[in-house]
Image (cartoon, rainbow, N blue to C red):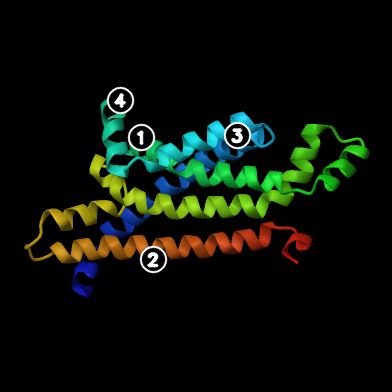
Amino acid sequence: MLHFWSQRWPDILGLIVEHIAVVAISLLIAMVLGVGIGMLVWNRPIPRSVVIAAAGVALTIPSLAMLALLIPTFGLGWTPTVIALVMYSLLPIVRNTVVGLREVPPAVMESATGMGMNQFSVLLRIQLPIAWPIILTGVRVAAQLTIGIAAIAAYVAGPGLGSYIFQGLSSLGSVNALNFALTGTLGVVILALIVDALFVTITRYTTSRGLRA
């Protein structure tokens, strides 16, 4: 295994960078969409239920089926991969945004309104900062989902470590089949652990001291 890694280190590093890039792009898009949608529907029961239900339905579609459905319209490569990852990321982000905004004590919002803030100012300057740790937890869950699903995106010629996993599985019995599969799998697991630790750190340093206490 070590000999395999030493020979193919440049390729492995390139796949790791691709994996990180496609996950980061997808999470950024999903976060903008998810938090924005959550802010629009958090206090509207019917739209809120519809949005969360729709995001939940998308999450139940098997990843291979989702990617296959995107091929006729978007072809192969980065585009269907990013679209699929964004769709899978929306549920935890939207749901946690809604939960976080709804859990802000009414007395806090009433006090802000009494100080002359309008509804948008209360949402942006009071509710959002208080809900931030819960929102980031949703993003953290979405990150773990996307890191795993991005590996399956090799099915549509997507970027990342999944290509090594598929290459190993498709060449079972050959000399390096196990090395390819294990390298891709270990890379995904290690990447998931690193990203999870990163989100723990981000949550700690972007949450106000009062909420951390």
Q: Residue 190: which disc?
A: 2
Q: Disc 3 to disc 1, how far (Cα)?
A: 28 Å
- Label 2, residues with CA under 10 Å away: few <14, some 14-19, many ≥20: few
The residue wearing badge 4 is 73
Which sits earlier in the primary sequence, circle 4 or circle 1? Answer: 4
Q: Disc 2 to disc 1, how far (Cα)?
A: 25 Å
Q: Residue furthest right?
A: 115
In this picture, residue 155 sits left or right of residue 83 = left
Which sits earlier in the primary sequence, circle 2 or circle 3? Answer: 3
Which sits earlier in the primary sequence, circle 4 or circle 2? Answer: 4
Query: Residue 209: percent from the left, percent from the top?
Result: 76, 63
Nearer to the camera, 19 or 126:
126
Query: Residue 11: percent from the left, percent from the top?
Result: 26, 57
Dot 2 amino acid type: Ile
Give the foreground label among 2 and 3: 3
- Label 1, residues with CA under 10 Å away: few <14, some 14-19, many ≥20: some
The residue wearing badge 1 is 79
Is residue 199 visible from the viewing direction of this image?
A: yes
Dot 4 amino acid type: Thr
Give the foreground label among 3 and 4: 3
Which sits earlier in the primary sequence, circle 2 or circle 1? Answer: 1
Dot 3 amino acid type: Arg
Q: Name above or below for residue 181 compared with residue 160.
A: below
Please tell me which residue is depicted at 52% across the width and 43% down the height of the picture: 28
Q: Disc 3 to disc 4, how far (Cα)?
A: 29 Å
Q: Residue 26: which disc?
A: none
Dot 1 amino acid type: Thr
The residue wearing badge 3 is 48
Nearer to the camera, 14 or 152:
152
Q: Do callouts 4 and 1 mark residues in contact (Cβ within 8 Å)?
A: no
Is residue 20 visible from the viewing direction of this image?
A: no
